[in-house]
Amino acid sequence: MPLAAYDTSRKAAELLATAREDRELLRQLMAMPALERIEAALGEARFRRYTLARMLALEAESALGDPARDPRAVAELGAAIAGTLPRDPEGTARRTAAWAYWLLGKALLQAGQWRLAEDAFQSISAFIPRGVPASEGEALACLGMAQLHEDLGHEQQAAALFLRAAYLYAKRGDPWPEAACQAQLGLLLHRTGDLESAARPLRAALGLIDAAFAPSLAARLRLVLAGVETVLGDAVAAGEQLRQARQLYPLAPSPVEEIERRWSEARIAAAADERETAESLLERVRRELLDRGSLDEAARCSCELLLIQIESRRYDAASQLAVDLARAFPPAGEPWAPELATLARLAAEEPEKCYPASCELRRRLRRPPAACPGRPALLVPARVLADRLFRGCGELEDPIGAAADL
């Protein structure tokens, strides 16, 4: 056997043996109760292995991309082990620990454990090397805290942190993470109604994204921009953004994404005062969400449809929308009857109060929803698509991205 082939074969065998050892150590740890597991990981030298920390990062990242799995246990264990790794001159241990705590923060954020998520993201600061401008750890912490503040409804803090994270990644020359941060900043500003400010980061993100790599995210950003241009009165620019968005649809022909796109096109039609088109599209979306979506999704769509119907002075439409929600989501959908009825009554009797009331209702609907047993969300959140881009995962690729490079 040639020497080079022998060396390759020997290295492969060593890697396989190491992976088996790590898998056995992981099995032993996961068989322990949670507190004992963390105590063992922190206290026993046999678990202080870079390869085990990397394996746990891969496991956590994979679980984050799977709605059926809870990534918290492996993410917590990975952070505990990564935090004990001895520092090396190349900074591999620091980077591994920073990513491990970011993955833990993301797992906790996904579970709605805000305080613990904040602690995890703040822990990244312990692994940021001093005197290094635009460190990856600082950028990770900024992005994590931005998403946390967004979930808590702190829009100004979230926007500032998304902007900071985008700046840090730009300084590092990392276009995909920068694009992911710019996209989330633009979508946040759009949701808060700051349309002119939203357009800048949305365009910046699109300038960095390879649309073939992230077609659904790119299409969503162009649809949002089409709506912004429509509201700002530039019909030509709006039409061009809509045309380019539709060109991306065949690159990601997802039935679920088609619902999201139809909803976006309904908003564009509503902004152009094409009420019949907007209402027709929203009614199709609403019916699909009542049949297959979550209460939160169906309630948001019902609210948007009601606002269009109110503009046509169809104030009695609220009752049927409320009945449909109650029937589709018993009993959780029943409280929406007075919410929608109040909005319709204000539009008919006190129109000056309708707009602030609708803004407040839509603001509450933007908050992370409470789980409805048996009816998970149907639509993919934009954050999930942005996170895939951030980690360097193509839309149709395996969800493992950044952790594979540790």
Image (spheres, helix red, strand yellow):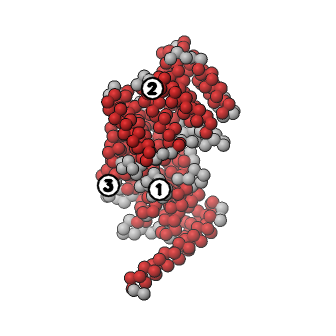
Q: Is residue 129 above or below residue 233?
A: below
Residue that numbered label 2 is attached to: 270
Q: Position of residue 376 (x, y in %)?
A: 61, 43
Badge number at residue 168 = none
Q: Position of residue 238 (x, y in %)?
A: 35, 32
* Cα distance in 3D space between marks 1 and 3: 25 Å
In the picture, the quarter occupied by the N terminus is: bottom left
Residue that numbered label 1 is attached to: 397
Residue type (three-letter) at the residue carrying disc 3: Arg
Density class for disc 3 (Cα within 10 Å; few <14, some 14-19, many ≥20) is some
Q: Residue furthest bottom?
A: 1
Density class for disc 2 (Cα within 10 Å; few <14, some 14-19, many ≥20) is many
- Residue at left 53%, top 72%? 19
Badge number at residue 172 = 3
The answer to which quarter of the image holds residue 26 is: bottom right
In the picture, the quarter occupied by the C terminus is: bottom left
